[in-house]
């Protein structure tokens, strides 16, 4: 989340008006699901939303939040990818239940974190996910507290967590919480899932290497290797691929309460796209993939990347103690998803406070292509998933060395 109150902000704004077509507001229920969303992961722009703020059961989609906590533990060196996690009989009971997404972990054996992560993401294995939650020595209940804390940090507002797996409370067997009704399970909004996915793409991009695997091998016991297939049917070569779009992940979820859910990440025209489909209609679980196809078809046929030329005021920044008074910056144009030219917008700069000197100016020396801040784009016709402006990196396009006394005096 970006806090404009906490960061020193240099605003250079310009309101520009074009005559053109305002991107349309799509009618509700275009997608056959209780909730759906499509977001540009790079800028945060909301391209489509339907029931995005409904808090709904999401089953194994909530494992993305589990992975976010595990990644924090890896980053802090509390655990490593090679750390081995011992499987208790209670975890094995969940892992070997054929009614669940099972991988048959053996009680008394230990498995590396990286393999458990593979099993959780590729097979959505419940036992492997529960083992991951205990990798740092936490109980599942303690891990849930960490998940709730992480949800707040990321900015999730309509998320309720019961356990690390996405199973209902009663399905957690000996890990069942006595203070929660048996049929309760993790719930999130489509918006929260999109925010969480965008966070993971920024902080844990290697996760896509895991989620893009069509198959993975998992050593259960010596001589017993289980080959697991990815539940994502939209990966390249799958049944529900989208021409022109490369799907790289991300997570399925299915339960009686949640129905069929799917979160995808895909590359289209150089942009990373996030889609969320919750509670796809009908009895065919593959409808979540069909509705995701419809979202990408909407993107391809109804929208195009519109170029917005930025005013001169935000294509340069003022410099202090430099050989020049200003430094040229980029981008000079940005792109948005729309159906016509943007009718109005405001562009503004936010300079990195660590690079700012006297009077809020950039301190020399400045390197070529150095990131010096961020560019924001706002418009009444643009929405972002977190409610903040569209964000683009602001970089210098020339070198500005430190100046001499006369240059400081006259600049």
Image: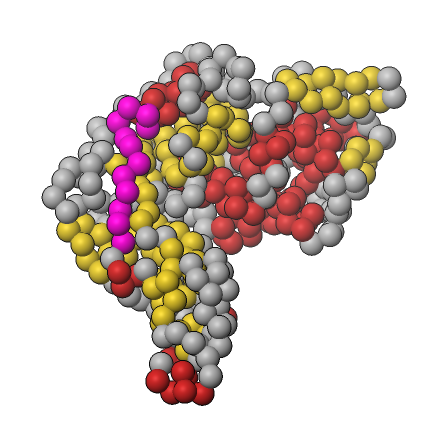
Where is residue 185? Give x, y as percent: 52, 33
Q: Does any portion of residue 114 appear in the rendered image?
A: yes
- Residue lying farthest right? 222
Residue 88 visible here:
no
Question: Which range is magenta?
Answer: 299-310
Residue 151 falls within the magenta-colored stretch: no
**Point 39% across, 45% down: residue:** 43
Q: Residue 385, located in which quarter of the rendered image?
A: top left
Q: Is residue 297 left or right of residue 98?
A: left
Give the number of marks: 0
Image coordinates of residue 398 in percent, x first then y, are 43, 62
Q: Is residue 176 left or right of residue 256?
A: right
Q: Nearer the viewer, residue 257 or 272?
A: 272
Q: Is residue 65 above or below residue 13?
A: above
Is residue 308 on the magenta stretch? yes
Residue beneath the point at 49% across and 50% down: 154
Q: Nearer the viewer, residue 94 or 324?
A: 324
How far across and down, in percent of the image, does residue 352 sit?
45, 66
Task: Identify the residue at image location x=53%, y=29%.
Answer: 249
Corner quadrant of residue 124: top right
Instruction: Tell me the quarter of the image containing the C terminus.
Output: bottom left
Residue at 46% across, 21% down: 260
Query: Eyeballing the image, is 129 above or below 318?
Result: above
Residue 340 in picture, x, y percent from top left: 20, 36
Quadrant assignment for the N terminus: bottom left
Q: Is residue 141 above or below residue 243?
A: below
């Amino acid at each position: 989340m970006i806090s404009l109150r906490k960061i020193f902000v240099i605003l250079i704004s310009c309101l520009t008006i074009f005559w053109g077509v305002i991107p349309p507001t799509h009618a509700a229920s275009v997608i056959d699901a209780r909730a759906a969303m499509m977001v540009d992961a790079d800028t945060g722009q909301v391209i489509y939303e339907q029931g995005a703020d409904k808090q709904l059961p999401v089953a194994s989609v909530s494992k993305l939040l589990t992975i976010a906590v595990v990644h924090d533990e890896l980053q802090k060196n509390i655990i490593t990818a090679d750390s081995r996690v011992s499987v208790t009989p209670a975890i094995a009971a969940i892992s070997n239940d054929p009614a669940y997404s099972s991988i048959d972990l053996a009680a008394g054996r230990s498995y590396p974190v990286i393999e458990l992560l593979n099993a959780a993401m590729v097979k959505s294995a419940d036992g492997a996910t529960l083992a991951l939650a205990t990798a740092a020595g936490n109980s599942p209940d303690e891990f849930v507290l960490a998940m709730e804390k992480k949800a707040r940090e990321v900015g999730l507002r309509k998320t309720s967590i019961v356990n690390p797996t996405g199973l209902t409370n009663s399905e957690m067997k000996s890990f069942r919480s006595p203070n929660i009704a048996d049929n309760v399970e993790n719930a999130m909004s489509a918006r929260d899932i999109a925010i969480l996915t965008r966070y993971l793409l920024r902080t844990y991009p290697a996760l896509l290497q895991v989620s893009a695997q069509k198959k993975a091998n998992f050593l259960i016991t010596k001589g017993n290797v289980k080959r697991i297939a990815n539940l994502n049917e939209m990966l390249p070569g799958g049944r529900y691929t989208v021409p022109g779009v490369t799907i790289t992940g991300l997570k399925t979820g299915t339960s009686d309460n949640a129905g069929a859910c799917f979160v995808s990440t895909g590359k289209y025209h150089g942009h990373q796209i996030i889609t969320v489909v919750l509670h796809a209609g009908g009895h065919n679980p593959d409808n979540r993939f069909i509705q995701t196809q419809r979202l990408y078809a909407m993107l391809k046929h109804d929208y195009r990347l519109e170029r917005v030329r930025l005013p001169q005021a935000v294509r340069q920044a003022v410099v202090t103690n430099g050989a020049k008074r200003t430094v040229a910056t980029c981008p000079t144009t940005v792109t948005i998803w729309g159906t016509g030219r943007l009718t109005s917008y405001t562009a503004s700069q936010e300079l990195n406070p660590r690079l700012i000197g006297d009077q809020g100016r950039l301190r020399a020396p400045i390197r070529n292509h150095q990131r010096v801040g961020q560019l924001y784009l706002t418009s009444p016709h643009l929405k972002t998933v977190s409610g903040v402006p569209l964000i683009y990196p602001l970089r210098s396009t020339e070198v500005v060395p430190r100046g001499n006394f006369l240059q400081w005096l006259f600049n």
